[in-house]
Image (spheres, rainbow, N blue to C red):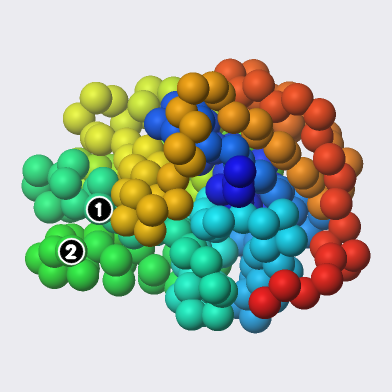
Amino acid sequence: MRPIGVFDSGIGGLTVVKALRDLLPEEEIFYIGDTARLPYGTKSASTVERYSFEIADMLLAENAKIIVVACNTASAIALPLLQEKLSIPVVGVIQPGAAAAASATKNGHVGVIGTRATIESCAYETALRAIDKNLRIIARACPLLVPLIEEGWLRDDVTDRAIARYLAPLVDSGIDTLVLGCTHYPLLRDAFSQFLGSEVNLVDSAQNCARAVTQLLEEKQIATTDTTQTARLTVALTDKPDAFLDIARESLQLELGEVLVRDPAERPRHR
Ligand code: DGL
């Protein structure tokens, strides 16, 4: 059985793994979190692109049949080139997130939050405008949120204040939908909801991305035929696991098993 390869700069991409597990429990998954080099969101585009290709090579070495770029920053910067250069299908999180937002908004006014690199790339604006050129979009980088989440401050005053400060201009401008454009952010869903109230839809890419993967597996006729049991989930990190892995595991209710440590420098090239 060939696995679905999934990668992120760290643990945040497990939010996408969770959605894949729920939708496709029979598909084996090999996940790599590049924790040794996290964050990607503060790095230059050329560095994010290089890291993305190195991790994709590691997934090809695991015989992945499809690669899911479960990182908004890597999707925003490296997805088109990965799709062009790799011999297997590659799916990102931006397009699924944009599609979910475009169908959720009623007043046509969408907010997008993410890392600096994701927001500077304007990838969400491009994807949203391609769906509906009349959407009003306001985007904002929230660089403090990833470290707060990694610290486990999911229900915390300091986090609530950072959220209020980042999101106030978006709320004032009248958004009715907010795209959580970073794979870490779904872990703050409750805190976002508390600040935004029930009038603003929260959209993350995970579920739509899992649906896109299902569709692609069927289209390419590479879905597993053994649907009788829950398949293996292997998690590998490029540095030793830290407390954030336990926070994510608990918050997402994911059974992870043993976590491997892999050094990207040791992988042969498979392209
Ligand atoms: N996983 C990254 C993303 O979805 C956020 C963390 C980072 O900056 O690497 O954009």
Q: Residue at x 58, y 19 (%)?
A: 253
Q: Which mark is residue 99?
A: 1
Question: Horizontal placement of 13 versus 236: left or right?
Answer: left
The amino acid type found where label 1 is placed reads Ala
Where's residue 156, x and y in %?
A: 59, 23
Q: Image quarter for residue 270?
A: bottom right
The amino acid type found where label 2 is placed reads Ile
Q: Residue at x 30, y 71 (%)?
A: 126
What residue is shown with label 2? Answer: 131
Q: Residue at x 70, y 27 (%)?
A: 256
Residue at disc 1, secondary structure: helix
Where's residue 218, x and y in %?
A: 34, 49
Where's residue 246, x and y in %?
A: 73, 24
Q: Is residue 101 visible?
A: yes
* Image position of 169 with respect to 58: above or below: above
Q: Is residue 141 visible?
A: no
Q: Image quarter for residue 190?
A: top left
Residue at the farthest front position: 225
Residues at circles 1 and 2 in contact by the CB criterion of under 8 Å:
yes
Where's residue 77, x and y in %?
A: 52, 72
